[in-house]
Image (cartoon, helix red, strand yellow):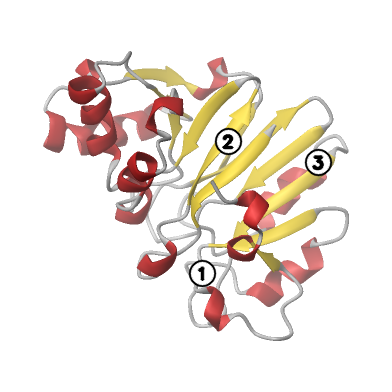
Amino acid sequence: MQIKFLGTGGAFDIDYLNSAALVTVREKCVLLDCGFTVYPTLVHKNLLHRVDYILLTHLHNDHCGSLANLLLHKHVIDKAPKPTILYPTDQFKAQVYEFLKIQVKNPDKYAEFVPLEHFEGIKAVNTYGMHSEGLQSFAYIFEEEDNRIVYSGDLGKPDILFDRLSRMPSLATCVYHDITFNQENTGHTFYKKLLPHMNGVEMFGYHCDPTQNPEDNPIRLVFYQKDLLA
């Protein structure tokens, strides 16, 4: 199992690109989020052909803004098989479908839609309203053999995610959590709130401007871990 980030920034940290990753699990490659910088990044790095599955944490523009571009490129330019969009709930599928209809008219022409429960090795954690009021969002847990990768999505209240982890079987676990260094930013987790959850897991922060990283932050930032970058 492997994770490679395509960007580690937030909506306004365009120098660091939108946070997104390619996760290889059970010998399948899953694109995790597709913000407005992701499609050009995949093209520039010649990685578009690897995307067979797509999984979204939520529908903010920095997490889904170039999804239509990716689907159209696969269909029109590459003439490749349709990628599969995995969805955790029927309600979220409907939201993704309506979002895509504005841009491609008939989403079924460009993507297969498959329930996440049909993909072995990935679990969703429902984080509704914990990033933005009234917004559906999800964190995801990837498992393969004795290893676990946890991806928070955008999450202002991390307790729900770590409570879920505490009730799961013990595995070597690496947590990638969105992070903010501004305590007034309630849509993301202030770094000091993550410190009690560091015991027993490896933890990395993403979705931030690394130049703002305070000296007392013990959480390693993905941006500085070159082996985690695509």
Instruction: Give the alpha-carbon distance from disc 1 to disc 2, as whole Å.
Output: 20 Å
User: Percent x, y for residue 107?
Assistant: 21, 24
User: Percent x, y for residue 201?
Assistant: 82, 53
Amino acid under label 2?
A: Val
Label 1: which residue?
Answer: 208
- Residue 130 visible to the viewer: yes
Q: Is residue 26 left or right of residue 69?
A: right
Amino acid under label 3?
A: Arg
Up-down relation of residue 135 to residue 106 (above or below): below
Up-down relation of residue 210 to residue 31 (above or below): below
Residue 23, label in figure: 2
Foreground: 116 or 69?
69
User: Percent x, y for residue 176?
Assistant: 65, 53
Q: Quadrant of the N terminus?
A: top right
Up-down relation of residue 24 to residue 44 (above or below): above
Instruction: Give the alpha-carbon distance from disc 3 to disc 2, as whole Å.
Output: 24 Å
Crowding at label 3, few (<14), some or many (≥20) Cα neighbours within 10 Å? Answer: few
First in sequence, mark 1 or 2: give its number. 2
